[in-house]
Amino acid sequence: MEIVGVYGSYTVGNKRWHGHMIVALHSFPWAIYSILFDKPGFLAMWLLWQWVHWRNMYKWLKDGKQGPAPHGH
């Protein structure tokens, strides 16, 4: 799963809005883990990170940061 997270972060570094979504969605197994193994602090941090990722994705879309311009433009 961490390969997916690394790819999402790499995508964010390439200024692609969907990188934030990839990183947010890839961490859902951690939420399941925190519930199954009664780790409320872990779940709280997961929720905080979810908020950050979705907020960032929203801001990038709102600000028109769809990605780098094609070569030659």
Image: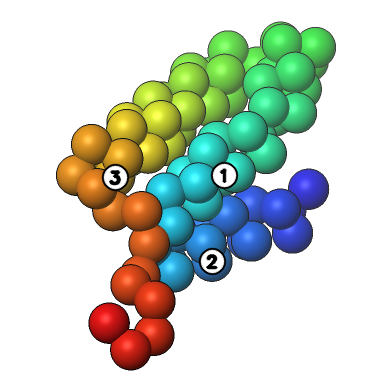
Q: In the displayed structure, does residue 53 sit left or right of residue 39?
A: left
Closer to the eye: label 2 or 3? 3
Tell me the tag on residue 47.
Answer: none
Q: Which residue appears at 32% of the width and 33% of the height?
A: 58
Q: In the displayed structure, does residue 29 sit left or right of residue 21?
A: right
Closer to the eye: label 1 or 3? 3
- Secondary structure, mark 1, is helix
Sequence-wise, the earlier of marks 1 and 2 is: 2
Whole-percent x, y for residue 32 in the image: 75, 18
Using the image as rendered, state which of residue 65 and residue 23 is in the foreground: 65
Kind of residue at disc 3: Trp
- Residue under label 3, please give it: 60
The image shows a total of numbered marks equal to: 3
- Residue under label 2, please give it: 10
Kind of residue at disc 1: Val
Using the image as rendered, state which of residue 25 and residue 67 is in the foreground: 67
Q: Are marks 1 and 2 in contact (CB under 8 Å)?
A: no
Using the image as rendered, state which of residue 46 and residue 42 is in the foreground: 46
Sequence-wise, the earlier of marks 2 and 3 is: 2
Q: Quadrant of residue 61?
A: top left
Whole-percent x, y for residue 28 in the image: 68, 27
- Secondary structure, mark 2, is helix
- Residue under label 1, please give it: 23
Q: Which residue appears at 19% of the width and 44% of the height?
A: 63
Whole-percent x, y for residue 55 in the image: 32, 31
